[in-house]
Image (tube, grey):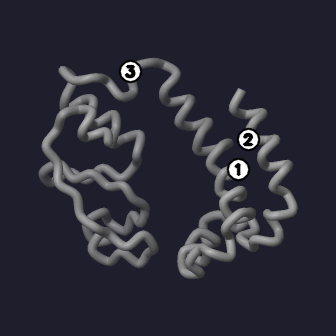
Amino acid sequence: MAMGLKKLNWRSVTIDRVPPRPHLEILAGGYRRIPVLQVGADIYCDTQLIIRTLDRLRPDSPTLLSNRMAQPLCWWWDKTMFPLLFKLLIGLRGNKLPREWLDDRQKFAPQISLKKEDNEKDISLIIQQINTHSR
């Protein structure tokens, strides 16, 4: 989406949604998350860094992180909203999510139970917290 907003030519590749991603790990020096941006020989591995790079590469198109609120909002989303929405997803659909995806996420969020029944009982509380943070 960001590439289109910046009116940049781009290509994409299809990659497994669950690691291992051996070709990506080689390209990105062991970095395992997506998205990744390659511009020539340079590799960018963080969404905020990618967006700042796109703004730098194409300053004549709409700026994506144009004001002082953009980065704090990104931080707030990552630290506050994402964990709540993740727990809500597990509570609502945990038994339908691929086991390998859940196992992979557990390594990086050991503090969050990835069992549907653990999060299902907290759905009303999670929704209240989301509503509180969204106002």
> Left of 59 or right of it: where is 115?
right
Residue at 17% over, 54% down: 11
Q: Earlier in the sequence, mark 2 or mark 1?
A: 1
Neighbour tally class for label 3: few under 14, some 14-19, many 20 plus, Cα within 10 Å = few
Query: For residue 66, what is the image quadrant?
Result: top left
> Left of 31 or right of it: where is 39?
left
Residue at 69% over, 32% down: 134
Relative image position of residue 14 (x, y in whole percent): 28, 67
Relative image position of residue 69 (x, y in whole percent): 52, 22
Could you say which disc has been placed on residue 113 in the image? Answer: none
| The N terminus lies in quadrant | top left
Q: Earlier in the sequence, mark 2 or mark 3?
A: 3
Residue at 41% over, 78% down: 20
Evaluate if marks 2 and 1 touch, with contact meaning CB atoms under 8 Å apart: yes
Residue at 61% over, 72% down: 107
Establish if 59 lies above or below 125: above
Establish if 52 lies above or below 84: above
Q: Which residue in the structure is indicated by mark 3?
A: 66
Q: Which amino acid is tagged 3?
A: Ser
Relative image position of residue 37 (x, y in whole percent): 27, 51
> Left of 29 or right of it: where is 87?
right
Q: Which amino acid is tagged 2?
A: Ile
Could you say which disc has been placed on residue 84 in the image? Answer: 1
Evaluate if marks 1 and 3 touch, with contact meaning CB atoms under 8 Å apart: no
Relative image position of residue 52 (x, y in whole percent): 33, 34
SS under mark 2: helix
Q: Which residue in the structure is indicated by mark 2?
A: 130
Q: Which amino acid is tagged 1?
A: Leu
